[in-house]
Amino acid sequence: MKLSQTKLLALSNHYIIWLKDSNTYIVFDKSNYKYFKKFQSSQTEATYLKDTAHFGNPDLANQIYNSLQVLCMPASQTDINLSDKEIRISGMKSCVLNYQQYCIMVHYNTQTSLALIASKFFHLKTKVNTKEVKGRHSIITQEDNSSYALQNNLNQTWIWQKNQPHLFQGKFSFEVLNSIHQKTEPDWIGTFHATTIGNGEQAVMLVGNSGSGKSTLATLLMYAGYDLVADDMSAMLAANNHIAVLPAALSIKEKAFATIAPLVDNFEDLPQQYINGTKGQVTYIPPLPLIHPEKLDYPCNNLVLVRYSQDPIPTTLTEGAEQTILQELITESWLAHNEAHAQSFLDWLGNVSFYELRYHNNTEAIAAVGSLFKK
């Protein structure tokens, strides 16, 4: 039952532990960390339960034991969506995405597959002469009656079932990211389901579950003069722990249309897409030009848990909420199964500040987040 290797970070109120076998990060508050230590030192379940009996909470001891037993199992290193299928581009249509003079050629065979990926990157479509750009990267999309397929310039191919369009879209965004930054998967510590904004020099990452208001707040911050570094997919470079620019459009849910529409020219003409019964219709807002367009990554030392309230409440930006933020950040993320990257990620977490923003008034929320750039 032993965990073969771990890495540990102590925060003010919590421990974060990386388990190498399962590539899992777990968060213990300091009062419960003693259960983990006993798990590590006990040889059997019986000795663990005996060793933790004096803690006075056998139900919690059992719960932690069972969870850690599962995490002892090695994580699969196989990408189940990776395929040896070859995609032929002859006869396909194509479009060109261009950012910072780097050309991304997208080949596709149906309008449906193009629509799935074009909505977030429609503003990058160009008729530029591809001979004038500094590089090329082909991403091929394909759709048949049962699945979606994606192939990159390394001839790696992934296939998803028709009920997994979000996975297809996420992988496409990741390949766009690789194209712009001229990177491959080993160059990244991970990608976070978070929105990152900046001031041209540094960045702040906004986290929160769906409906928390982070994309709406990011849009308001962008129109208040801040940079949109990335929406939904905030990727961390292994080389410097910076958050990389991903020029994808912001996805704004229908309940925020009345707030955002007055800020955006021709809002009604922007791409829309129905996501599901929970998220409903979304509109995609293209990012405004960056303050320093040549700069492609930013240091980020502040994490903000966004909590919008429909009812009027005082705006508060308070330090803390470590465990909630870490769970939001890690649970929804892809993190590389790499020991050096894991240590680098923990080192980064040890140097960031954790905040919780609760607000109803948008102007006050913009000011609150803006104040973090002065710290």
Image (cartoon, rainbow, N blue to C red):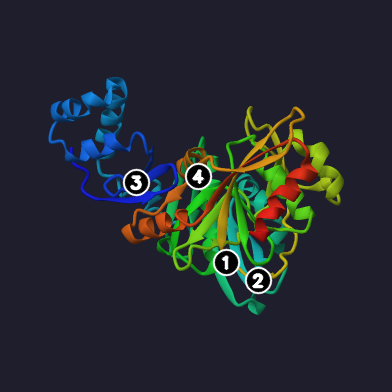
What is the number of the mark on residue 17?
Answer: 3
- Sequence-first tag of 3 and 4: 3
Residue topped by disc 4: 329
Q: Residue at x 16, y 36 (%)?
A: 42
Residue depth check, mark 3 versus mark 1: number of the one nearer the observer: 3
Q: Residue at x 34, y 57 (%)?
A: 338
Residue topped by disc 1: 180
Relative depth, front residue between 113 and 351: 351
Residue topped by disc 2: 100
Characterize the local packing of mark 4: few (<14), some (14-19) or many (20 or more) Cα atoms within 10 angstroms: many
Task: Give the distance between the C-alpha atoms of the residues marked 3 and 1, in whole angstroms.
Answer: 33 Å
Q: Residue 232 at x, y = what percent?
A: 59, 48
Dot 4 lies on which element? helix
Dot 2 lies on which element? loop
Q: Is residue 40 visible?
A: yes
Dot 1 lies on which element? helix
Q: Are marks 3 and 4 in contact (CB under 8 Å)?
A: no
Q: Residue 152 at x, y = what percent?
A: 48, 60
Q: Residue 88 at x, y = what percent?
A: 49, 59
Q: Is residue 146 above or below residue 200?
A: above
> In the displayed structure, does residue 158 sit left or right of residue 321?
left
- Sequence-first tag of 4 and 1: 1
Characterize the local packing of mark 2: few (<14), some (14-19) or many (20 or more) Cα atoms within 10 angstroms: few
Q: Are marks 4 and 1 in contact (CB under 8 Å)?
A: no
Q: Residue at x 57, y 47 (%)?
A: 194
Residue depth check, mark 2 versus mark 4: number of the one nearer the observer: 4
